[in-house]
Image (spheres, rainbow, N blue to C red):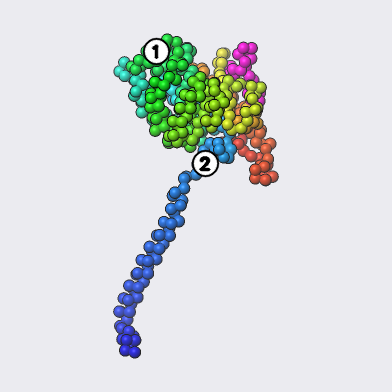
C-alpha cells in the first residue's frame, strides 16, 4: 500500500520524465528494427546481376543479327559517328569490324622513332580509341562483331602483307621472315606469347567493358585449323568472353561446337544459302561491294559471269536467311572509303532491301508465342517502314 501511494505521490514532472525515457528507448529500438528490415530487403537485389536487356540471348530467347561489316571503323580518318548513325537508322543491329587493318596501315602495336613496330609493346591509346568507338555503337543499340585477327592481311595481296606489322621488314622483332605472305608461319607456337599478350590487352581494355554486347570473331577466313582456333577460344573463355564466332575455312566440324556463331562467307545470292544449316548458330556473310564505275552502285555476285545481283536478288538473299532463322552480314569493305560521295546512298540502298525483307516477314507473322490475336510482331531493333 505504501509503495503504491508513493508512486501516486510522484510529482507530474517526474512522471513525464519517466515517460520520456521509455518512449526514447522504444523509438531507438523501432529505428534499429526498421533499418535492419530495409537491409534485409535490399540485400537480395544487390546480389543479383543487373538485367542485360541488350544481350545477344543466343542460348535463350531470340535475336537475329542483321548488319554490315566494315574494315576501317578504327581508321583515324573514319567518320564513324556518321557511319553508326546511318547504320542504326537503316534498321541494323550489328556492325562487324576488324581490330586492325593492313590495307589502312594501322595496328595496335607501338612504333619506334623510325616507324617500325615493336610486337612486344601494345599501344594503349589505340585500345582506348577502340573502346570509345565501340561505346558509341553500343549507345545506339548496335552490337559489335570484332574480328581479332585477319588472315587476308597476311596473304600475298596488294597492300596486305607488305604493310603488315608482323612482316619482319616492318618491325624490330625480326619476324616473320616470309617473302610473300605471313601464313602459315603466323600460326606457329613460338608466336603464341605475342598473340596472347594482344588478346589480354584486348580483353582488359575492350572485352570486359562490352562483354554483353560484343561478339569476338577469332580470325577472318582463317586457314589455321581447329588447333590454333581452339587455343584462342579457350583463352577467351577463361577470361569470361560470352560470345565467340568463327569464319574458319577449314575444320568446320571441329570448330562449330566450340563457338556461338559460325559464319559462312562469300554468300551473295539466295541459292548459295544452305538451308540445312538453320537457326541462330549460323551467320551468312555477303561479299557484296561497291563497284563505283560511273557512279553506279552495284554488288558483286557472280564475277565469273559478269553478273551483279539486283536489288531484288539482295532482297531474296535477306529473306532466305531470315526464314531459316540465321544472321546476316553485308561486307561493305572495298572502295567504300575512296568514294565518299556515294557513301550515304550506297549504304541506304543496301540496307533498304534488308528493312523491307524484315518488315514484310514480321508484318505477316502472328504472335504465336503469346497466344494472342493482336497480329504483328516487330523485329528487334528494326524500325517500321515509313
What residue sits 65% from the left and 43% below the top?
A: 369
Q: Quadrant of the N terminus?
A: bottom left
User: Of 355 and 181, which appears nearest the observer?
Assistant: 181
Q: Nearer the viewer, residue 282 or 316?
A: 282
* Residue neighbourhood size for the residue with mark 2, other residues' Cα within 10 Å, grouped as few (<14), some (14–19), many (≥20): few
Rendered location of residue 176, percent (x, y): 40, 15
Q: Is residue 144 left or right of residue 309?
A: left
Front residue of 149 and 225: 225
Q: Position of residue 94 (x, y in %)?
A: 53, 31
| Main secondary structure along the magenta-highlighted residues | loop
Looking at the image, the residue that sits furthest to the bottom is 1
Which residue is drawn at the image coordinates 50% and 31% (left, top)?
244
Q: Which residue is painted at 38% across and 63% down in the image?
A: 31
Q: Residues within 10 Å of mark 1 (few under 14, many from 20)?
A: few
Q: How many marks?
A: 2
Q: Which mark is residue 53?
A: 2
Q: Residue at horizontal 47%, vertical 15%?
A: 155
**Magenta span:** 295-317
x and y percentages locating residue 122 in the rendered image: 36, 25
Q: Quadrant of the C terminus?
A: top right
Q: Which mark is residue 255?
A: none
Examine the structure image and report whether residue 362 is included in the region drawn in magenta.
Answer: no
Q: CA distance from mark 2 to mark 1?
A: 48 Å
Q: Which residue is mark 1?
A: 177
Among the two numbered marks 2 and 1 on one chain, the one whose residue lies closer to the N terminus: 2
- Residue 44 visible at all: yes
Amino acid at each position: 500500500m505504501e509503495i503504491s501511494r508513493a508512486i501516486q505521490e510522484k510529482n507530474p514532472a517526474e512522471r513525464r520524465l519517466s515517460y520520456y525515457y521509455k518512449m526514447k528507448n522504444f523509438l531507438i529500438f523501432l529505428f534499429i528494427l526498421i533499418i535492419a528490415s530495409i537491409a534485409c530487403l535490399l540485400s537480395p537485389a544487390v546480389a543479383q546481376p543487373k538485367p542485360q536487356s541488350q544481350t545477344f540471348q543466343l542460348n535463350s530467347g531470340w535475336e537475329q543479327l542483321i548488319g554490315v561489316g566494315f574494315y576501317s571503323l578504327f581508321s583515324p580518318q573514319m567518320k564513324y559517328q556518321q557511319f553508326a548513325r546511318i547504320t542504326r537508322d537503316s534498321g541494323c543491329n550489328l556492325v562487324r569490324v576488324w581490330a586492325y587493318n593492313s590495307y589502312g596501315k594501322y595496328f595496335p602495336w607501338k612504333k619506334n622513332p623510325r616507324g617500325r613496330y615493336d610486337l612486344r609493346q601494345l599501344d594503349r591509346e589505340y585500345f582506348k580509341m577502340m573502346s570509345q568507338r565501340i561505346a558509341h555503337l553500343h549507345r545506339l543499340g548496335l552490337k559489335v562483331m570484332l574480328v581479332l585477327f585477319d588472315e587476308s592481311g597476311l596473304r600475298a595481296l596488294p597492300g596486305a602483307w607488305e604493310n603488315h606489322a608482323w612482316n619482319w621488314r616492318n618491325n624490330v622483332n625480326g619476324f616473320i621472315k616470309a617473302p610473300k605472305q605471313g601464313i602459315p608461319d603466323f600460326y606457329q607456337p613460338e608466336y603464341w606469347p605475342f598473340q596472347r599478350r594482344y588478346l589480354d590487352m584486348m580483353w582488359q581494355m575492350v572485352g570486359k567493358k562490352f562483354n554483353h554486347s560484343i561478339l569476338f570473331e577469332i580470325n577472318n577466313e582463317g586457314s589455321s585449323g581447329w588447333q590454333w582456333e581452339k587455343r584462342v577460344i579457350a583463352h577467351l573463355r577463361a577470361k569470361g568472353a560470352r560470345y565467340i564466332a568463327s569464319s574458319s575455312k577449314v575444320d568446320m566440324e571441329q570448330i562449330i561446337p566450340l563457338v556461338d556463331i559460325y559464319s559462312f562467307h562469300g554468300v551473295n545470292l539466295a541459292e548459295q544459302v544452305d538451308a540445312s544449316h538453320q537457326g541462330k548458330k549460323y551467320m551468312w556473310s555477303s561479299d557484296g561491294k561497291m563497284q563505283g564505275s560511273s557512279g553506279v552502285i552495284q554488288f558483286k555476285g557472280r564475277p565469273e559471269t559478269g553478273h551483279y545481283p539486283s536489288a531484288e536478288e539482295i532482297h531474296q538473299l535477306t529473306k532466305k536467311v531470315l526464314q531459316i532463322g540465321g544472321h546476316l552480314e553485308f561486307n561493305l569493305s572495298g572502295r567504300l572509303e575512296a568514294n565518299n560521295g556515294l557513301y550515304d546512298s550506297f549504304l541506304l540502298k543496301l540496307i533498304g532491301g534488308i528493312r523491307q525483307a524484315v518488315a514484310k516477314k514480321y508484318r505477316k507473322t502472328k504472335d504465336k508465342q503469346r497466344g494472342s490475336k493482336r497480329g504483328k510482331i516487330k523485329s528487334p531493333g528494326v524500325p517500321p517502314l515509313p
